[in-house]
Image (cartoon, grey):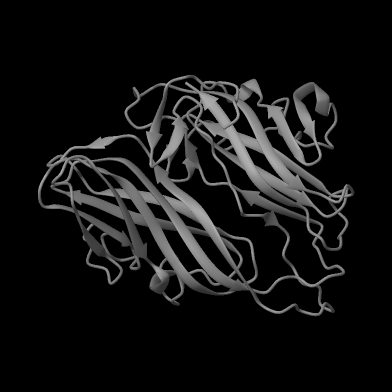
Amino acid sequence: MPAFAGMTNKDNMIGGIKNYRNALLHVFGGLCFCFLFLAANQVQAAEETRTITTFIHQDSAVRPSGQQSDENFDFTFVMTDDIVDIKNAFFDVSGISAVHSGQTLHLSLDDDNTDDVFDFDESTAKTYTLDSTGGPTPFHLIYNVTNVMATSGKDCYVNTRGTYDCTLSFRADNANVYALSIKLTATYRFKPPGTGGGLPAIGYYESPIFNSMQTGETSGIKSGFHNLNWTETNTGSQRIKFQIASCDSVTGTTCNDAGGWVYRGRDGGTATYYGFYESNFSDYCSGSSGTYNCRISFDHYNKRYFRYKITLCSASDCSTSGVAPSPGVNKVILNWSP
């Protein structure tokens, strides 16, 4: 793993992945934020299949037996393709269970807006028994949720391009669990764009909200944000640019700070951006050939929550329609320290 500004040597193992708790990285890999539109006169290509993985949760907290309460893991599932249907979807849940008998885990991707997400009586709810009789034991569970994400009328039913706000409910009974990690993997059919044109002039992607304070850290600790790194695909006549918003207090998706979520660019201005083709790029950023690294504005220091926004433009003026291939972002890394 390369070194990033703000990393320390205080590292631990979470779910088999080395996680620098003072510089947690938010990474999208294998998922392209890009235009996927057909022109009216465009010949549609044959349907294709794609698999994407979405990070849901990871922490180092110890959940002692007899002290565990129900938890909700809210997440945003992003579908960037012209989807036909979900073929398979499952949560990959891993962690470590300590020595204790009769340990069970309950999982539910809730499919009823009128019901209590913590009662686990939905048709999707599953219970798993953990084996830890021989000492601390790693566990790895597969929780299938195809029937939720592929069925009309369910919460988290994915049937078109867009973002979906979903909730995974979790409960550990009589269990001592730590190093919990959760990912969602979905395989789906989609209609790829043809060749030759039909891209809109501009499009946007807004990330979920991220909490920079790790489980177990002292409440009130705020973060210094250091660098934004990304990998993009761009014909040279297209434009890709970022802005970052930060907040001290969040309720749900609402920023309670004065002005709410305010997206800012490289110099802290609301009309500036992080991007290779932005003015004074070398004063704030470095990189070439589609991989770039920018210093984050000091306006975000001493904040706890953050999110980012990507603007994709088919042409340099961000107002002219373009032709395929689409501009795209393949990886985003943002690091910070307390």
Q: Nearer the viewer, residue 108 or 22?
A: 22
Q: Find residue 262 and report its horizontal and vertical position in percent.
A: 61, 35
Classify residue 65 as left or right of residue 304: left
Coordinates of residue 3 in the picture (x, y in percent)? 59, 25
Q: Position of residue 115 (x, y in %)?
A: 27, 64
Q: Quadrant of residue 294?
A: top right
Instruction: Work out which residue is located at the far front of the displayed protein and give it.
Output: 134
Q: Quadrant of the N terminus?
A: top right
Compare residues 88 and 316 and report the one nearer the observer: 88
Residue that appears at 84% across and 37% down: 277
Q: How many marks?
A: 0
> Which of these two is toward me, 84 or 205?
84
The quadrant in which residue 213 appears is top left
Q: Residue at x 39, y 74 (%)?
A: 147
In the visual, does 115 lie left or right of 157?
left
Above or below: residue 264 compared with residue 313? above
Image height of 34 relative to 244, above or below: below
| Residue 144 appearing in the image | yes
Q: Residue at x 74, y 46 (%)?
A: 232
Q: Quadrant of residue 67?
A: top left
Q: Report if residue 255 is visible in the image.
A: no
User: What residue do we see at 80% from left, 61% from top?
Assistant: 200
In this rendering, position of residue 262 left or right of residue 183: right
Query: As drawn, which residue projects farthest toward the left?
Result: 101
Name above or below for residue 10 compared with residue 259.
above
Q: Is residue 250 above or below residue 281?
A: below
Residue 154 lies, in percent from the top left, at: 40, 72
